[in-house]
Image: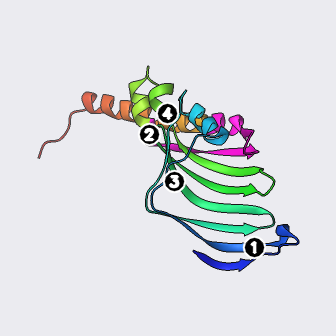
Amino acid sequence: YIDDNCLLLMDSMKSSMKGSLLVHKASVGTGPLVGEIAKLLGASSTSVVLASEMTVPIQVEKGRVHHQNLKLTVNGFAVTTNGSVGFDGSVAIVADVPVPANLLFKNNPRLMQALSNKSIKVPIAGTLTKPAIDFKAFEGAIATLVRDAGKDVAADLIKGGLEKLLPTKKK
C-alpha cells in the first residue's frame, strides 16, 4: 500500500514514498546480511523464512528505503530488523537478535535459563554485499545481559539459601 508518493525521475535522491509492504507468505534466499546474523546465532548453514501476514511500514527518502519491524526467522530464531538500505547498497540496520544462550552458556544451566528469551540489538553497517556487524556493540550487549542475569541468579541463590536457614512462619 502506498500512502504518499513523489517520484522524481531526473533526481531519484529527492524522491519520496511512504506506505506499507504487506507480506502474505514469503521465503527468501540467504544473502551476506542474513549470513552474518546466522553466524551470531551459531549457525553454519542458514534457512530464512519471513513472517506470514506481516505489514512492514516502509518509507523512501533521501536515497534510502527505511523499514520497521521486518520479522524473519533465521534457523529457528526470531529476528526483527529496523533501519534502511541506500540506493547505493549501503545498510544502516539494527537487528533485534535472540541471545543464543544454549550455545554460549551450555555449561551454566542457571545462567542459560536466565538468558533464555532475551534479545539484544545488533547494529549492522556496510553494504548489502559486505555487511559489517558491530561486534563491540554485540559483545557489550551480551556482557550487560550476562551481568544483569548473574545478579538475578545470585539473588535467587541467596534467597533460596536464606529460606533454608531461616524458619518460616506457618499460619
- Tell me which label, 3 or 2, sits earlier in the chain: 3
Per the rendering, the mark at residue 100 is 4
Please tell me whether mark 2 sits on a helix, a strand or a loop.
Answer: loop
Residue on which disc 3 sits: 71
Q: Residues within 10 Å of mark 1 (few under 14, many from 20)?
A: some
- Identify residue type, mark 3: Lys
- Tell me which label, 3 or 1, sits earlier in the chain: 1
- Tell me which label, 1 or 2, sits earlier in the chain: 1
Q: Residues within 10 Å of mark 3 (few under 14, many from 20)?
A: many
In the picture shown, does residue 35 fall above or below 17? above
For marks 3 and 4, give the one nearer the viewer.
3
| Residue 151 picture location, percent across and down | 48, 35
Question: Which residue is found at the position 45% from the left and 62% from the top?
Answer: 24
Residue on which disc 2 sits: 76
In the picture shown, does residue 76 fall above or below 13? above
| Residue 71 picture location, percent across and down | 51, 53
The reply to whether the magenta stretch includes residue 126 is yes
| Residue 18, quarter of picture | bottom right
Per the rendering, the mark at residue 16 is 1
- Identify residue type, mark 2: Gly
The reply to whether the magenta stretch includes residue 20 is no
Q: Residue furthest top?
A: 107
Q: The magenta stretch spans which residues?
A: 115-141
Question: Real-space Cα distance between discs 4 and 2?
Answer: 11 Å
In the image, taking residue 166 as reference, residue 127 lies left or right, namely right
Please tell me whether mark 1 sits on a helix, a strand or a loop.
Answer: strand
- Tell me which label, 4 or 2, sits earlier in the chain: 2
Question: Real-space Cα distance between discs 3 and 2?
Answer: 12 Å
Q: Residues within 10 Å of mark 2 (few under 14, many from 20)?
A: few
Question: Which residue is found at the position 57% from the left and 74% from the top?
Answer: 1
Front residue of 9 and 38? 9
